[in-house]
Amino acid sequence: VRVSDGCLERLKSIAGTTNDKPWCWHNELWTCFDSKVSSCDMWIRNVTSSIISCCFGKGSRVGKSDQDFFRMCQGLCAKEASFAASIFPALIFHLLDSETRDDCQENSGVQDTIMSSIAIGSPTSEMNQTISHCFARILNPISNSQVAPQAVTVILNTLELLRAITEWRFLTSPEHAKNKAVAQKQNSSLPKKRRSRNLSDSGDVDSFASSPRWRGFPYGVVLRVSGLDVAKACFKVKRYYSALFYCEMSMQNLIGSGTFFEDVAHDSPLKHDEAAVHDISGFGVLSGKEENEERKEVLEQALLAQDIIGCCLSEIHAKDELGGVLSQGSALNLKKNIRSLNTLEGSSRDNSFSMLVDLDSSLQTKSGNANIDADASSGFSTI
């Protein structure tokens, strides 16, 4: 059952347009600041009905059978908010998956081959960019107004569906393969230690090629959104374990290791040379920022992640883990203060800077000794 022409005109007026195509992505339609149930119900009904009218008709890349199904659901979506919220994630998935995937180049490695085969659309497609913009307005609104929790929940449910699909595709992909051995001629006249040293210098170990640079998890939420924005949204709707998951996923994509707090505090080099991965889409798109700006942003992101993780651990009453995170947060704040003083001039700056550097060196030495002791022991830490 389709909605009436009068209803379509009303939806277009809410979007603030009458002729633009597609009008369902206009900012006015993707605004839900009122937390009243009636207002949120109206919002999801309007958005879902508008998407079906705009994107599931003539010129759509979605399969005809899927188009017919969603168009039959349009009338019920306009009347029942719970049904519209259930249909919404499937709408987004079909729109993204209908986009042409990026072709895998001829000499691509296993990683690129797998990522191309499991991808939902393309990170550079107009549809991905448009939906990413709309979702970002809900997850991290520009204005100071608070988005209704019901709207945030709908967006998070959609992102979780997309992540689950790409993760399942990755785990079941038939493209997984062992690293190919590198054929190398070993000079029998060279001593064994020297041959081993030459092999290490070439970047190969035990005749296997070096691993490709870290480009984040090979699966994700598909859309180009910040993992920390997703984590903050999860915390807002009291999904504390989901917030922890996406917070760690975001930092591991950015830094390339699970020990991200320690790596940032100790100025460890990033696991990739050119740039960092600043979203959790799973496409492994590297940013092109300058090194100094990138390192500054990494520290700021780590401090934000520490705050989110600390709040979540506090809510779930994980006292021991919270103590470890707060300790790492102190080291990160010290690093931030050192960098701030490094930009100042004068004798007062020199004295303060020298004291902070000495304190930082002392903390890093203690942390390094603690890590050695932990490695030598049979116990383990949850942080």
Image: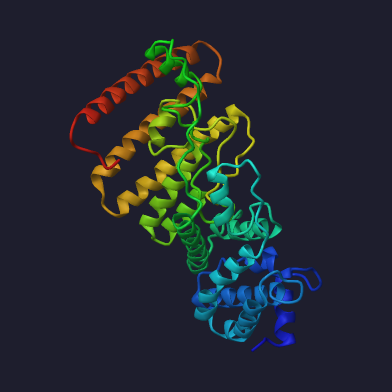
Residue 207 in sight from this viewpoint: yes
Residue 78 in the image, given as x and y percentages of width and height: 60, 83
Residue 22, compared with residue 306, is above or below; it is below
Using the image as rendered, state which of residue 299 and residue 383 is in the foreground.
383
Using the image as rendered, state which of residue 283 and residue 311 is in the foreground.
283
* Residue depicted at x 39% and y 10%: 191
Residue 283 in sight from this viewpoint: no
Using the image as rendered, state which of residue 356 and residue 379 is in the foreground.
379
* Residue depicted at x 31% and y 50%: 314
* Residue most extreme to the right: 19
Residue 287 in the image, given as x and y percentages of width and height: 62, 39
Which corner quadrant holds the C terminus?
A: top left
Residue 81, compared with residue 231, is above or below; it is below
Which corner quadrant holds the N terminus?
A: bottom right
* Residue depicted at x 61% and y 79%: 70
Residue 105 in the figure: left or right of residue 19: left
Residue 297 in the image, given as x and y percentages of width and height: 54, 35
